Image (cartoon, rainbow, N blue to C red):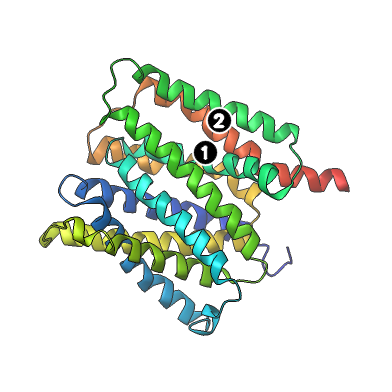
Amino acid sequence: MDNAMDRPLAGILLRLLSGLLFTGMMVCVKAVSVEVPLGQTVFFRSAFALLPIVLFMTWRREFPGALVTRRPLGHLVRSGLGAAAMFASFAAVARLPVAEATLLAQLSPVAMAVAGVLLLGERFSLHRAAALALVLCGVAVLVVPDLQGARPDGRLLGYALGILAALLTAGALVTVRRISRTETAASIAFYFVLVTALAGLATLPLGWVPVSGSTLWLLVLSGLFGGAAHICMTLALRYAEVSRLAPFEYVALIWPVLADLWIFGLPLSASFLLALPLVLGGAVLAAFEGRLRRRLRR
């Protein structure tokens, strides 16, 4: 990373801001989940996310030039996996506290590391094994207490959807790793939200509901927050290494916890508090692998 882009403080602040914006998006989604169908929520979130993304691309003088692509199939695969992950994630947050749904999303970096071994031929290191073990223990601590007496439409289904969303996100990120050699971050983000909006729109025949007032504003804000969060995360990764940002995953989870306590009045479960350091520890360990490998090469 060159000196012009090595701005760790800016990267850290942007990562924290992206966590706050992402939490705002999840709060909006959960607030409308009872009355608005899932596909309709996905459509609004994706359609209105296009606005900040296009404005950002225009500011950087990348619109529409950056949309030219040599990997249309790669974009389709990445966007399809990302769209499926969004559906699963929003279905999970409708059934779980925001903090628990956000914690399950932290499975993605570890799942991505394992996918790199299986799909990209990367080495299965001790770091990856330890990260996987920590995450699996954390998931077990979170889920096992609810296994007895859980109903199919309750928390257990929410956990399953949250884990599925994390796995699909990992698959999407592996695809991003492949196509980013020739495609810009702006084009990857644009096509993702476009395809996801179309996927949400495809659910219109299944039945949407009229929305107005506060519900409409929450749907619009979910898109604006989501698009802005993606921009902040993109810039954070531009200014600082993943391993340098990884410890701040702990700080970013403060916002979902506060949202559950102050907005939805949901107490923190003992299983969540026990699973928190295990899952985030695994995610941080997986992120630090790249830095350790570079140090060993020196």
Q: Is residue 104 above or below residue 201?
A: above
Give the image location of residue 189, x and y in percent.
Answer: 48, 66
The secondary structure type at the circle numbered 2 is helix
Is 90 situated left or right of 137 in this image? left
Q: What type is the residue that disc 1 sits on?
A: Leu
Give the image location of residue 132, x and y in percent.
Answer: 61, 31
The one nearer the camera, 234 or 111, is: 111
Give the image location of residue 288, x and y in percent.
Answer: 68, 42
Cα separation, mark 2 vs mark 1, equals 7 Å
Task: Residue lying at the far right in this picture: please name it.
Answer: 298
Is 63 situated left or right of 49 in this image? right
The one nearer the camera, 113 or 269, is: 113
Quarter of the figure with residue 49: bottom left
Give the image location of residue 182, x and y in percent.
Answer: 65, 71
Picture mark count: 2
Q: Which residue carries the number 1 mark?
A: 107
